[in-house]
Image (cartoon, rainbow, N blue to C red):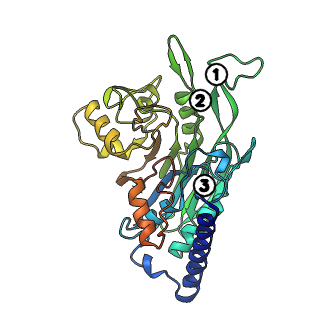
Amino acid sequence: MGTHRRTRLRARHLILAVSATLMLLASGVPAANAAQVPSPSNSLQVWNLNTHGMDTGIGPAPNDAPTRSDYRDFISYIIDPSRVAYYPDLITLQETGTNDGGITTTTCNEFAWLVHAGTNRPYLCVETTKVGGAAIVYRSDRLALLASNPNVQVKRIVNEKNQSPGETLGSCLYKGWYALVLLMQDTVNSKYLAAESVHLPNSDYTTASGTQDCAWENTQIVNQAVANSAVKMQVMAGDWNALDATATGANEDTFTAWRCWYQGTNAAVGTCSGPNLGWRDGFYDRCPAGGASVKYSCLHTGDWTYIPSTVPSKPHRRIDFLFARGSLIQNAVTVGWPEALASATAAGNTEQVPSQYSDHRGQGALISYNP
């Protein structure tokens, strides 16, 4: 991107930010978002996104990212009343606010401020500042923060690239990645909820017997961290860096089997080693009945979240998940890049550079509390 283009983009975003602030001060509610309303008293509008290092497509790429994106287009979508009826209540983020291990990404406060600027609702955020960049943004006139745990360590498999002296190849060890858990109370219905943002390491280890990772061990760790018998809703969402299933074909469109970690997590699928963890996947539930291959085809076609650039056929894969324990999961949606760009364009972004809001696709759902 040339210097003049960057200058114009910086100027445009500064003008938009100032304009949004002036609208808030002058009228109280931005006219473009007047139709969006608070979620029902027994439900929360929840979103999840890997922000791709909070890239905006302006200036140097965060941490030398090979492709550029603009996370703000995702915000344009989730506050667009023509797309979503309700204000965002809870947003789990990854690759946000890291300042560790030579990795630096923009704080989640910037994300929270932009959601506030577009909705005239107050938003706060909490982040680990550790590798993985787990963070949670929440609407603070609906949810009250009671406690946070930014120190949920997850494991990374030892392979030839990350092995340290004394470590055994193929072992799952703590190597500096963290998830984040918040305990909150809903100020509308007084119910408690626990929410977790997860970003698992993207490493595996391949031998003649197959490829291994730490997905199941890590899922048990993050499941235990968010478990709380006093709450009426639990959310566990993020970037697992692990496929939900194995499949064949150049585009990985022929189902073979659910991966063990996913079988053991999704209450509707089965077990891995030990009891099922009892989470609902609203995207799986929304797909038509008809067996595992029908479910996979539905998810693979409409709810993929990532395209690996290193695989020549560029298959669509699902590695980002929004799991919940609640009485009902409705309106599950995977946000397409063109749809988010269209929302951004309607909100005044006419540059259309970059065209993607991340190298991942985010998810959202309306989740209801248990009785």
3D distance between C-alphas at marks 2 and 3:
22 Å
User: Would you place residue 108 above or below residue 252 in this image?
Assistant: below
Determine the residue located farthest toward the bottom in the rendered image: 26
Residue sitting at x 21%, y 35%: 290
Q: Quadrant of residue 9?
A: bottom right
| Label 2 secondary element | loop
| Label 1 secondary element | loop
| Label 3 secondary element | loop
Residue sitting at x 41%, y 50%: 326
User: Tag 2: Cα neighbours inside 10 Å, few (<14), some, or many (≥20)?
Assistant: some
User: Tag 1: Cα neighbours inside 10 Å, few (<14), some, or many (≥20)?
Assistant: many
Q: Earlier in the sequence, mark 1 or mark 2?
A: 1
Residue placed under numbered mark 2 in the picture: 203
Residue sitting at x 42%, y 27%: 259
Q: Amino acid at mark 2?
A: Ser
Q: Amino acid at mark 1?
A: Asn
Q: Amino acid at mark 3?
A: Met
Q: Earlier in the sequence, mark 2 or mark 3?
A: 3
Residue placed under numbered mark 1 in the picture: 159
In the image: residue 44, left or right of residue 97: left
Asked whether residue 136 is in view, the answer is yes
3D distance between C-alphas at marks 1 and 2:
8 Å
Residue placed under numbered mark 3 in the picture: 54
User: Tag 3: Cα neighbours inside 10 Å, few (<14), some, or many (≥20)?
Assistant: many
3D distance between C-alphas at marks 1 and 3:
28 Å
Quarter of the image for the C terminus: give it: bottom left
Label 1–label 2 contact, CB within 8 A = yes
Residue 345: percent from the left, percent from the top? 43, 68
Residue 34: percent from the left, percent from the top? 42, 79
User: Would you place residue 75 above or below residue 54 in this image?
Assistant: below
